[in-house]
Image (tube, rainbow, N blue to C red):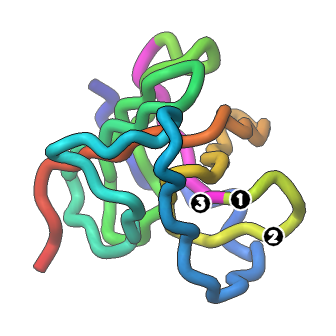
Amino acid sequence: MLNSCGEPSAASDAPDYGDEPLSASQSSDFAPHRDSVKSIDLRSLRPGTKVVVNTRNSRYNLVMCDGSGWNALVQGGSRFPQETQAQVEGSTLGGSALKIGWIGVGLFLVISASGKRILTSRVRSIRFDGFSG
């Protein structure tokens, strides 16, 4: 596991459009899982919280580094074969609008690492280990 999560976010100046994440479709692509949620505000999670995001093509394991909702250790998909320090920017429908700090089923997850922005395939499920409360 990486030791440091203190790098500033490259996407901290992105606009927040304020819309709630879309609800999951009831199609087989977005079938609910018993221990999953439809959306999650990453800013509400305690440091160390583990989030598993299954997309159409991959699985991403996130470990939140701080209460900002940005900084995480990410592993999964073809882009993150090893745990990598990254910024989880949020979710999008695929256009220029980005829901900052949120992950939503049916949306695309946006992650920045090493100066590159990665857009995942559509999120199918989200599971987490503990909410900050």
- Could you tell me which secondary element the residue under label 1 belongs to? strand
Considering only vertical position in the picture, is 79 above or below 89?
A: above
Query: Label 2 is placed on what type of residue?
Result: Ala
Q: Residue at x 66, y 35 (%)?
A: 120
Q: Is residue 100 left or right of residue 32?
A: right
Q: Quick one: 114 or 41, which is closer to the camera?
A: 41
Query: Label 2 belongs to which residue?
Result: 97
The quadrant where residue 93 appears: bottom right
Between disc 2 and disc 3, whose residue precedes? 3
Q: CA distance from mark 2 to mark 3?
A: 10 Å
The CA span between labels 1 and 2 is 6 Å
Task: Please give the range of residues in magenta.
Answer: 82-91
Distance, label 1 to label 3, CA atoms, is 7 Å
Name the image quarter holding the C terminus.
bottom left
* Label 3: how many Cα within 10 Å (few below 14, some 14–19, many 20+): many
Q: Circle 1 is placed at which residue position?
A: 92
Q: Position of residue 87 (x, y in %)?
A: 56, 50
Is residue 57 in the magenta section? no
Q: Is residue 22 left or right of residue 37?
A: right
The answer to which image quadrant residue 37 occupies is bottom left
The residue lying furthest to the right in this view is 96
Residue sitting at x 52%, y 34%: 29
